[in-house]
């Protein structure tokens, strides 16, 4: 199998050199060139025909998002964004993923050479996964984002959300920020409560929750420790914490866990799914969307073994079919569905009837 050809685009000469050396240390990767800005990158893409592009999120003298948008319209190819851990960096990265970037890695704030070495496995793994990703032209990769009207703030909770004892649990990774947007945008405001885990850095969790909330009729928020889980709400873990669901009498509550990474992730999908299996059992519905690796596969199997319906996103609509594929191999999924059909099926399995 031929090596993955990578073009590194970054305005910093130091970062270009370090990323090139780090990527080239993997025998399955060949760094075919570097570029200091998108204009140079455009010419080198034509000449070198790389399989994957690494692209700095914030670059002076040139708008990286504008370059990415043009690239995904005219010559769609796998792109891994290299992001800072700032709030602005998080917002731009999420916009880049909406435009069709496959995944992202974050730059450490200090000790660049040493820190990048520590992240070698993550960076090389994401680049190689990106080379196998399904990249679509921007016209189909990014749908128009519409802010749905929420229920009036003065409306009492009892009239805004119907009572339910069902719980939907969703896990995702690479490609998941947009896949989750698609699923949540199709959910009605009175849908059963949703708990989710997306592999994302700590500083990205709040901007991510806010972005999902803007495009969903449900209320999307970072979970608080001990917070009651309510219908019509979506909960995701804040910064660097696992999210667990615990039973409190006839109710469920969120439990935040700063414990060690599981499957090299914190938050981890397996942690969420296993807690849902223990606390909700057959009253839950589980789903794994696009993502790299196998996190969540064992947890989804535990959910299925308790009698909970389970499903995964199909290979054709997944950016990376690692996590869903791993769940299929374990026999953890009852169904496999394209992305656009997942929200409706989750509601059916949860016994939800949308009000007329």
Image: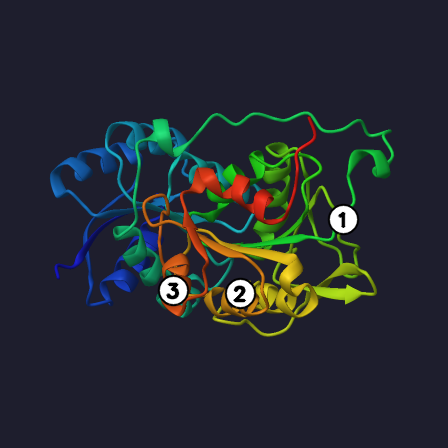
Cα distance, mark 1 to mark 2? 23 Å
| 14 lies left or right of 194 | left
* Nearest to the observer: residue 163 or residue 120: 163
Residue under label 1, please give it.
230
Earlier sequence position, callout 3 versus callout 1: 1
Which residue sits at x=44%, y=53%?
Answer: 335
Q: Within 10 angstroms of label 1, few (less than 14), some, or many (20 or more) residues? A: many
Decide: is 274 above or below 91. Answer: below
> CB of mark 3 within 8 Å of CB of mark 1?
no
Please state the horizontal and vertical placement of residue 217, each as a whole percent of the image. Answer: 66, 33
Which of the two marks, 2 or 3, is nearer to us in this view? 2
Residue under label 3, please give it.
326
* Nearest to the observer: residue 266 or residue 30: 266
Q: Secondary structure at mark 1?
A: loop
Q: Within 10 angstroms of label 2, few (less than 14), some, or many (20 or more) residues? A: many
Q: Secondary structure at mark 3?
A: helix
Residue under label 2, please give it.
304
Earlier sequence position, callout 1 versus callout 2: 1
* Nearest to the observer: residue 35 or residue 160: 160
Please state the horizontal and vertical placement of residue 207, each as a whole percent of the image. Answer: 61, 43
> CB of mark 2 within 8 Å of CB of mark 3?
no
Decide: is 164 above or below 151. Answer: below
Earlier sequence position, callout 2 versus callout 3: 2
| 257 lies left or right of 107 | right
Q: Is residue 93 visible?
A: no
């Amino acid at each position: 199998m031929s090596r993955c050809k990578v073009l590194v685009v970054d305005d910093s000469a130091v970062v270009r050199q370090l990323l090139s050396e780090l990527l080239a240390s993997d025998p399955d990767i060949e760094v075919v060139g570097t570029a200091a800005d998108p204009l140079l990158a455009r010419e080198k893409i034509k000449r070198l025909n790389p399989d994957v592009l690494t692209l700095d999120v914030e670059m002076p003298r040139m708008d990286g998002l504008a370059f990415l948008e043009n690239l995904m319209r005219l010559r769609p190819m796998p792109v891994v964004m290299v992001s800072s851990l700032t709030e602005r960096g998080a917002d731009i990265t999420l916009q880049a993923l909406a435009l069709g970037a496959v995944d992202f890695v974050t730059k450490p704030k200090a000790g660049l050479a040493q820190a990048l070495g520590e992240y070698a496995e993550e960076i090389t793994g994401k680049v190689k996964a990106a080379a196998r990703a399904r990249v679509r032209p921007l016209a189909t990769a990014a749908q128009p984002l519409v802010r749905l009207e929420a229920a009036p703030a003065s409306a009492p909770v009892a009239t805004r959300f119907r009572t339910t004892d069902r719980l939907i649990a969703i896990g995702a990774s690479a490609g998941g920020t947009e896949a989750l947007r698609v699923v949540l945008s199709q959910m009605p405001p009175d849908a059963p409560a949703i708990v989710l885990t997306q592999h994302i850095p700590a500083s990205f969790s709040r901007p991510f929750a806010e972005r999902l909330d803007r495009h969903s009729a449900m209320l999307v928020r970072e979970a608080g420790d001990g917070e009651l889980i309510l219908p019509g709400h979506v909960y995701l873990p804040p910064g660097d914490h696992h999210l667990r669901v615990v039973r409190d009498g006839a109710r469920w509550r969120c439990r935040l866990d700063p414990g060690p990474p599981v499957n090299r992730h914190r938050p981890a999908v397996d942690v969420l799914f296993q807690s849902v299996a223990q606390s909700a059992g057959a009253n839950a519905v589980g789903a794994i969307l696009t993502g790299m690796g196998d996190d969540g596969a064992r947890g989804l199997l535990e959910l299925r073994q308790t009698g909970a319906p389970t499903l995964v996103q199909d290979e054709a609509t997944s950016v990376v079919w690692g996590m869903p594929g791993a769940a299929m191999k374990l026999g953890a999924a009852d169904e496999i569905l394209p992305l656009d059909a997942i929200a409706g099926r989750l509601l059916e399995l949860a016994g939800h009837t949308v009000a007329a």
